Image: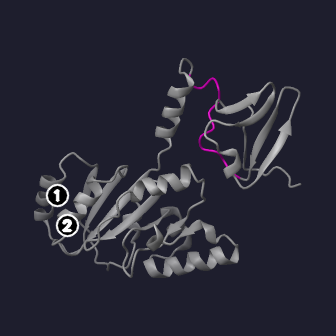
Amino acid sequence: MSEIKSIHTSCKDCAFAQYYCSTQTGCDFNRISKFKEVREAYDNEKNFYIINGRQCNYFTSKDKYPGKNKEELIELVVKKHKVQLTLFVYIDDESKLLEIADSIIEQDLQPHEVYFVDINKIGPKLNLLLNKKIGNKLNWRIIYPVEDFNIGEIPEFILQKSKGLFSVFLSSYQKIKYNWISNIDNMINQELKQLCLITPIGDGISCFTTMPNLIRHSGIYSFKEFVEFIQEEAEKDNKQEMIINGNQL
């Protein structure tokens, strides 16, 4: 039996742990069976589970939110841990810009923030178009790059804007697929996947999704080269399940 790793989660005092007498039987979110490595543990008080090698982001101590009933607590925790995502739209052509804006607005789970990157130097007209279309429906900004770069790159000044756990990239020819963000949230919070990359749809950058810290750590700022690097590393470590083919979502 493997030892308890330095990263782990004890379910003992979690508000969502289900018990029969002093023995844990499950979890209000049905997570126990979804984690890959679960250990049974006990002390003088209880028999309980330990999630080994993972932190359970839903763990909530019983006394953290006094006065809330179970239903209210579940709603609060699910809302709190919805995936935080930054969306970047590379604008090198304005012909489909409004369609792309619509596809973002129509997502059932909104991005934390959206940046429209004016690669083609459209200028003030871009702000007028987006303000009329989006208004206050999204948390959005425009980036006017000082330096030139091509649509196949992810410059550091772009990554500095990303405050979410994941970043999604689009070109001005491609709409974001419906429910894309909620699908990511479902994979992370319901299926409990350790997701690190969703490869682009087709040959472009459409819906390319990854963690910005991974890009920084790799030092690779080309979309194509970064995907190849992550695929090679995942194969070495036998962790191919951390990569999702965007064409299959």
Q: Residue at x 21, y 45 (%)?
A: 136
Q: Position of residue 232 (x, y in %)?
A: 61, 80
What secondary structure do most residues of the magenta stretch adopt?
loop
Which numbered tag is attached to residue 231? none
Q: Taking 111 as reference, is 41 left or right?
A: right
Count of marks placed on residues:
2
Q: Amino acid at mark 1?
A: Leu
Name the residue beneath numbered marker 2. 97
Residue 130: which disc? 1
Q: Secondary structure at mark 1?
A: helix
Residue shown at the point (46%, 58%) measured from the top left: 166
In the image, is residue 18 part of the stretch drawn in magenta? no
Q: Residue at x 66, y 47 (%)?
A: 55
User: Is residue 61 within the magenta segment?
Assistant: yes
Q: Quadrant of the N terminus?
A: bottom right
First of labels 1, 2 by sequence position? 2
Q: Position of residue 117 (x, y in %)?
A: 27, 66
Q: Is residue 174 above or below residue 116?
A: below
Tell me which amino acid carries mark 2. Answer: Leu
**Between 42 and 230, the one nearer to me in the picture:** 42
Q: Are dots 1 and 2 in contact, CB under 8 Å?
A: yes
Residue at 58% in and 54% down? 191
Instruction: Read off the magenta span.
Output: 54-65
Q: Tag 2, which secondary structure?
A: helix
Q: Residues within 10 Å of mark 1 (few under 14, many from 20)?
A: some
Label 1 and label 2: CA atoms lie apart by: 8 Å
How would you rate the neighbour count of disc 2 (Cα within 10 Å): few for under 14, some for 14-19, many for 20 or more? many
**x and y, in percent, of residue 159 in the image:** 41, 63
Q: Say whether residue 79 is left or right of residue 217.
A: left
Q: Is residue 30 above or below residue 195?
A: above
